[in-house]
Image: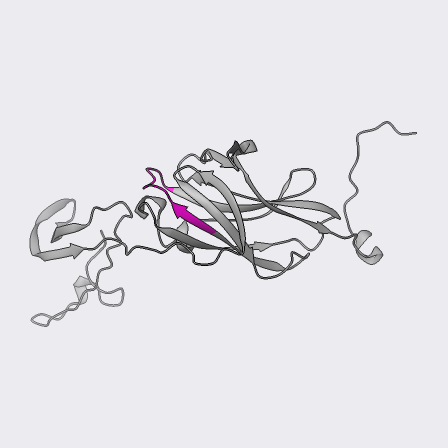
Amino acid sequence: MREAGPPDLPPSAWPVGELIRDQYALPLPYTIVPGVYRLMLARTGPGAPMGDSFLGFVQVEDFPRSPVPASVPVSISARVGEMTLLGYGFDAPFARGDTTELRTMWRADGTPSRDGVLFVHVLSPQGKLVAQDDNSPEQGKRATQTFRAGDGINQLQRLALPADLPAGEYRVMSGIYDRAGGARWPATRDGQPARDDLVPLMTFTLPELPPMFRAFLPVVSTGGAAQ
């Protein structure tokens, strides 16, 4: 609901007897059922409705079927909720200060009942989250509830690593969580429960930083007593 008229031409400035074109954008919820709907224009005055008008019928179509990715560079066997994680691929090695594009490939084994967020997280050797990409399917254009059994998802994930990460082995993990509440969907890898419902994808190792950069890293206390 909004005030009538374009932003630069409010109703108080409408010329008497002239036609005014007023354009509305009506975003549909992901969960709307395909079918025929009535299109109505409701009018309200100061604090009270002024009636409505029937404009016509609109046909809401379902999303087209989305094929399962034809090529999966690195295949895995993981199940997350009603989705199967088929595998992944990435365009370049992970490096400090760079953004790596990684694709996760999924297949819907049924229509999910929840609005899920697909994510890829990068964890430090200590388990700290250092990079992430969390998004709805197709880069935010769809919701998990819109996929039917047999549909595929080819999800682009962009992971930007900080330039000052210390050396060590890093883990790349994937999964899905509820948009409402943040609970992760139950996950398995190779038929076994995945710890913390995180599906391991790969590991990579960052080498030691050059000496000129180490001087700028924060000093981390181990908590031991001074000698």
Visible residue check, residue 175? no
Residue placed most toward the observer, 49 or 73: 73
Q: Residue 126: which quarter of the image? A: top right
Q: Quadrant of the C terminus?
A: top right
Query: What residue do we see at 60% from left, 59% from top?
Result: 99
Is 110 one of the magenta-colored residues? yes
Q: How far from the left and from the top, in percent, is residue 216?
A: 78, 52
Identify the colour scheme used. one colour
Q: Residue furthest right?
A: 227
Q: Is residue 82 left or right of residue 3?
A: right
Does residue 51 appear anywhere in the picture? Answer: yes
Q: Residue at x 67, y 45 (%)?
A: 170
Residue 111 inside the magenta-drawn segment: yes
Q: Is residue 184 left or right of residue 8?
A: right
Q: Image quadrant of residue 25?
A: bottom left
Residue 101: x %, y % from top left: 55, 58
Q: Main secondary structure of the magenta part?
A: loop
Residue 141 in the image: x percent, y percent? 36, 55
- Which residue of the protein is positioned furthest toward the top in this rendering? 225
The magenta region covers 105-115
Viewer-nearest residue: 196 or 210:
196
Q: Residue at x 15, y 50 (%)?
A: 35
Residue 12: image location, x then y, percent? 17, 63
Q: In this picture, is 220 found above or below 14?
A: above
Q: Nearer the viewer, residue 165 or 7?
A: 165
Q: Nearer the viewer, residue 216 or 29?
A: 29
The total of numbered circles placed on residues is 0
Residue at left 79%, top 30%? Answer: 223
Image position of 227 (left or right of 152) = right
